[in-house]
Image (cartoon, helix red, strand yellow):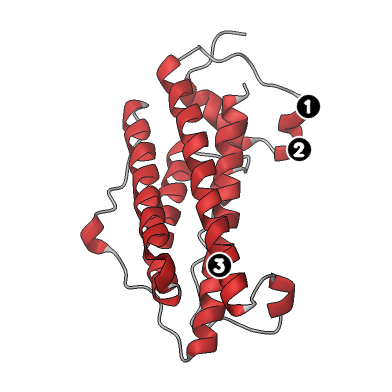
């Protein structure tokens, strides 16, 4: 089989179910050095962001004794919180532009929602602000790679940021902060898997 371009390889990998990816490596990539460098660099970056989110989750657990989702099954966050979809990153009808755009849109949304965590954990301001900066930088990295691959990009200007969610009381704020971090962690895990499978080809 002839060599695949990075765009086509991306479509094949992320278009397949995750289970199939473990047992059947796809055709060899063209050896695009810049694309592979992008993947490895941003795998490390995403891992670092996940670690920072986990540190904030531990802070919420230690400070408010909100540690697992099972404990909060009957508590609904108020208001409804962001749960950015990444369904286009692992479905057969995959489109590279849509997957990368979903990742960037999710990073944009969680950047804004972290403002609520900033209010909740004032003693961790530096970590929260670093996390916001890292989310913005990861989004920028992905946008640059999309442009390098000739994919259509959607500009997400900083001035169009949404205000962080507000809550009806202190407990709802604590619950909201817990779920913002939990949802963001799940989002990052899915984005990480997408990059990792590409890097393993």
Q: Which residue position is annotated with label 2?
A: 19
SS for callout 1: helix
Q: Quadrant of residue 200?
A: top right
SS for callout 3: helix
Is the residue 76 above or below the residue 153 in the image? below
If the image is split into quadrants, where does the C terminus sit? top right
Q: How many angstroms separate mark 3 from mark 1 (CA)? A: 38 Å
SS for callout 2: helix
> Are the two marked residues, 1 and 2, in contact with CB atoms closer than 8 angstroms?
yes
Viewed as shown, does residue 159 lie left or right of 142?
left
> Are the two marked residues, 2 and 3, in contact with CB atoms closer than 8 angstroms?
no
Q: Residue at x 76, y 37 (%)?
A: 19
Q: Residue at x 64, y 76 (%)?
A: 66
Q: Residues within 10 Å of mark 2 (few under 14, many from 20)?
A: few
If the image is split into quadrants, where does the N terminus sit? top right
Q: Residues within 10 Å of mark 1 (few under 14, many from 20)?
A: few
| Label at residue 139 | none
Q: Which residue position is annotated with label 3?
A: 59
Q: Which residue position is annotated with label 1?
A: 23
Question: Going from the N terminus, do you reach mark 2 or mark 3 first?
Answer: 2
Q: How many angstroms separate mark 1 from mark 2 (CA)? A: 8 Å
Question: Going from the N terminus, do you reach mark 3 or mark 1 first?
Answer: 1
Q: Residues within 10 Å of mark 3 (few under 14, many from 20)?
A: some
């Amino acid at each position: 089989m002839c060599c695949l371009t990075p765009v086509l390889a991306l479509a094949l990998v992320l278009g397949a179910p995750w289970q199939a990816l473990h047992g059947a490596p796809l055709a060899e990539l063209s050896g695009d050095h810049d694309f592979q460098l992008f993947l490895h660099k941003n795998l490390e970056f995403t891992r670092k962001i996940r670690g920072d989110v986990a540190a904030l989750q531990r802070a919420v657990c230690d400070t408010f004794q909100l540690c697992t989702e099972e404990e909060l099954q009957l508590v609904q966050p108020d208001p409804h919180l962001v749960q950015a979809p990444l369904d286009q990153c692992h479905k057969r009808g995959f489109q590279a532009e849509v997957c990368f755009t979903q990742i960037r849109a999710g990073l944009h949304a969680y950047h804004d929602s972290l403002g609520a965590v900033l209010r909740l954990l004032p003693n961790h301001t530096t970590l929260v602000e670093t996390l916001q900066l890292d989310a913005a930088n990861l989004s920028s990295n992905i946008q640059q790679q999309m442009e390098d691959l000739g994919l259509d990009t959607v500009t997400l200007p900083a001035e169009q940021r949404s205000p962080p969610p507000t809550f009806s009381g202190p407990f709802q704020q604590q619950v909201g902060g817990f779920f913002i971090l939990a949802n963001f962690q799940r989002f990052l895990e899915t984005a990480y898997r997408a990059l990792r499978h590409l890097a393993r080809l």
